[in-house]
C-alpha cells in the first residue's frame, strides 16, 4: 500500500478528533498511521524537505480544517 493522498486523511483525522478532546499532532499522526496500517518504511518516507509524507499530508488536513473552508466539510 502506498501512503494515501492528503484528502484521504480527512476521515481518520475527524475520527481522531470526534471525542471532543484536544490531541497533539503526534497523537493524530499515530491514529492515522494505525488507521491505514502504514508500514515502518511508509512512515519514514520523506519529502525533499525532510518532512515525512505522513506529517505533510495530515498537516494539510489540519490546515484545511482550521481555514475558512471548514464549513464545506
Image (spheres, rainbow, N blue to C red):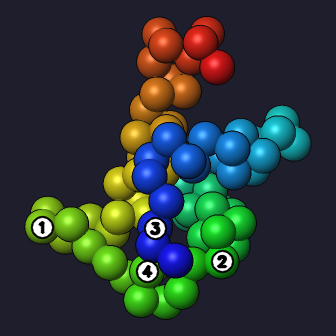
Please say if 49 is above or below 7. below
Q: Earlier in the sequence, mark 1 or mark 2?
A: 2
Q: Earlier in the sequence, mark 4 or mark 1?
A: 4
Q: Which residue is mark 3?
A: 3
Disc 1 and disc 2: Cα gap in Å? 24 Å
Residue 48 x %, y %: 12, 67
Q: Nearer the viewer, residue 73 or 31?
A: 73
Q: Residue furthest front?
A: 1
Residue 2 x %, y %: 45, 72
Q: Residue at x 82, y 39 (%)?
A: 18
Q: Earlier in the sequence, mark 3 or mark 4?
A: 3
Among the 4 quarters of the image, the one containing residue 47: bottom left
Q: Which residue is mark 2?
A: 37
Which numbered mark, 1 or 3, is in the foreground of this view?
3
Q: Earlier in the sequence, mark 2 or mark 3?
A: 3
Disc 2 and disc 3: Cα gap in Å? 10 Å
Please say if 50 is above or below 5. below
Residue 7 x %, y %: 50, 41
12 sits left or right of 49 in the view: right
Q: Assign a secondary structure to mark 3.
A: loop
Q: Which residue is mark 1?
A: 48
**Decide: marks 1, 3 in contact (CB < 8 A)?**
no
Number of the label disc, if any, that sits on residue 42: 4
Disc 1 and disc 3: Cα gap in Å? 16 Å
Amino acid at each position: 500500500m502506498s501512503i494515501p493522498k492528503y484528502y484521504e486523511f480527512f476521515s481518520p483525522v475527524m475520527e481522531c478528533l470526534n471525542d471532543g478532546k484536544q490531541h497533539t499532532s503526534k497523537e493524530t499522526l499515530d491514529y492515522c498511521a494505525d488507521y491505514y496500517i502504514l508500514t515502518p518504511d511508509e512512515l519514514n518516507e520523506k519529502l525533499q524537505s525532510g518532512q515525512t509524507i505522513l506529517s505533510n499530508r495530515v498537516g494539510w488536513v489540519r490546515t484545511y480544517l482550521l481555514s475558512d473552508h471548514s464549513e464545506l466539510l
